[in-house]
Amino acid sequence: MDTLSLIIASVLIIIPIFISYKEKLGLEKEIIISMIRAIIQLVIVGYILEFIFGQKSPVFTICLVLIMIINAALNTKKRGEGIKNCEFISFISIIVGTAITLSVLIVSKAIAFVPNEIIPVGGMIISNSMVAIGLAYRNLNMSFKNRRSEVEVKLSLGSDIGDASKTIIRDSIKMAIIPTIDSAKTLGIVSLPGMMTGLILGGASPLIAIKFQIMVTFMILSSVSISVILATYMAYKDFFNERKQLKI
């Protein structure tokens, strides 16, 4: 796609702006700002990746992946409001999930340790883990608030905080992972995912694209599961004080 084609395709932005104006949604300014931010951010990232892809040192690749993980961890703060050190918990959870998943992919030779493979794949792993952890945090906050009596009854009967919170922990992990599972169920039937679509548009055989998409599906489900279970088990303890009482 050349620049002129992109400029012509940009007229599509007029559609949501028109709908917002006609229905009086008040989203016109937000849509324009979000598009401008997206363009600026993507251009900056494009130049950064152009530089990193030209480097042979793995240090640049590792540093960029770490920066992505830090930003993802910081973005979970909105969902984890009220959870102490939720950014640190998210960082540890995402970095462990990412490290394990990437290590398996590299050892199996599914991908090579080169910037143009590690960074895109790492980005998919990190972003999906971030969203899942955010869902887990939100469910923890809601569940401990709505099911306070249930937890306190279990505590009063002698249960430890882990036993008293077991159902909430299990539900939070389940709620965070289910969207990824549901997404996998509809692959190829409802949607052609980004990885597969990109390869096909790039001229790759659909059968080759399918193999890569299957790998992506496996890695996302794996990393999401690891990150969510770590984050949930580390975060739930913050809902109790040193005397094992609910703080809410």
Image (tube, rainbow, N blue to C red):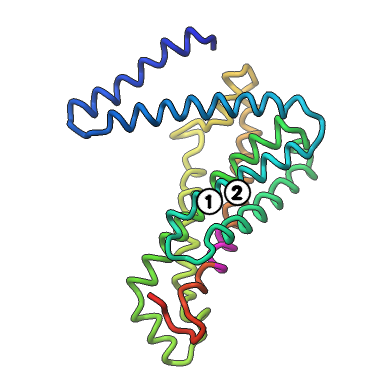
Q: Residue 126, relative to residue 226: is it above or below?
A: above
Q: Picture quarter containing residue 204?
A: top right
Q: Picture quarter containing residue 141?
A: bottom left
Relative to 115, 32 lies left or right: left
Residue 151: percent from left, percent from top: 40, 80
Q: Is residue 247 magenta?
A: no
What stretch of residues is rendered in magenta? 228-234
Q: How many marks?
A: 2
- Residue at 47% x, 78% y: name it: 240
Q: Which residue is mark 1?
A: 74
Residue 217: percent from left, percent from top: 59, 42
CA distance separating discs 2 and 1:
6 Å
Residue 135: percent from left, percent from top: 45, 55
Residue 70: numbered disc: 2
Q: Picture quarter containing residue 36?
A: top left
Does the magenta stretch mainly form a helix, a strand or a loop? helix
Quarter of the image that includes the C terminus: bottom left
Amino acid type, residue under disc 1 in the picture = Leu
Residue 74: percent from left, percent from top: 53, 51
Q: Residue 4, relative to residue 61: is it above or below?
A: above
Marks 2/1 in contact by CB < 8 Å: the verdict is: yes
> How many C-alpha atoms fall within 10 Å of the one at disc 2: few (<14), some, or many (≥20)?
some
